[in-house]
Amino acid sequence: MGVGQQASEQHLERFKEVLPASVLQLWRRFGFDGFGQGRWWFTDPLEWQPVVDAWLEDTEVPFPEQKWWCLSRSAMGDMELWGEVSGPALTITPTLAGYDHTPEAQAGCPTR
C-alpha cells in the first residue's frame, strides 16, 4: 500500500535474537505496511505491545510465561502473535473475543 513505515535498525537489532531471519528480511523489504488493499498488515510489534498486553492480561494461555509480539494483523483485527519461547503460537480474534492456538490457526506462519 505504501503507507506504512520503515523498520528501523533499532527494531532489527531488538528482534534479531527473537524472530527468524526471514521475518527480519521481510521487515527490511516492506517495513510495517499493508497489503491486499489494507486487508493484511505487517505490524510494528513495539507499537502494538499495549494492545497485546491488554488482550492477554488475566488470560490463561496454554504456554509457558513469555513475552508475546504482534507481527501481523488483518483488517478485521485478527492479530498473529509470536511468543519469545513458543514462536508463532497465538492468533487473537477480537470479533470472537478470544484466541486460537491450534495448528490450523497457525498454518503458513514462519518458523525459526
Image (cartoon, rainbow, N blue to C red):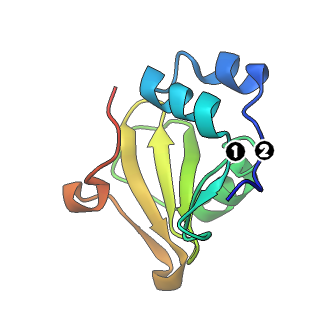
Which mark, by number, is residue 5? 2
Give the quarter of the figure containing the N terminus.
bottom right
Q: Visible in this render: residue 60?
A: yes
* Dot in front, 2 or 1: 2
Label whose residue precedes the other's in the sequence (2 or 1)? 2
Disc 2 from disc 1: Cα separation: 9 Å
- Dot 2 surroundings within 10 Å: few (below 14), some, or many (20 or more)? few
Residue, far front: 2
Give the quarter of the figure containing the C terminus.
top left
Looking at the rendered structure, the kind of residue marked 1 is Asp
| Vertical relation: 6 (above or below) 100 | above
Is the Cβ of the residue at disc 2 closer than 8 Å to that at disc 1?
yes
Which residue does the image show at 76% across and 36% down from the upper left? 6
- Give the residue at mark 1: 44
Query: Where does the image place residue 88, in percent across and percent down from the top left?
Result: 38, 43
Query: Where does the image place residue 87, in percent across and percent down from the top left?
Result: 39, 36
Helix, strand or loop status at disc 1 = loop
80 left or right, relative to 1: left
| Vertical relation: 63 (above or below) 36 | above
Q: Nearer the viewer, residue 29 or 27?
A: 29
Query: Where does the image place residue 26, in percent across and percent down from the top left?
Result: 53, 34
Which residue does the image show at 56% across and 78% down from the upper left? 76
59 left or right, relative to 42: left
Q: Visible in this render: residue 20?
A: no
Which residue does the image show at 47% across and 55% down from the upper left? 80
Helix, strand or loop status at disc 2 = loop
Which residue does the image show at 63% across and 58% down from the upper left? 34
Q: Nearer the viewer, residue 70 or 35?
A: 35
Which mark, by number, is residue 62? none
Query: Where does the image place residue 28, in percent across and percent down from the top left?
Result: 63, 28
| Vertical relation: 1 (above or below) 109 | below
Looking at the rendered structure, the kind of residue marked 2 is Gln
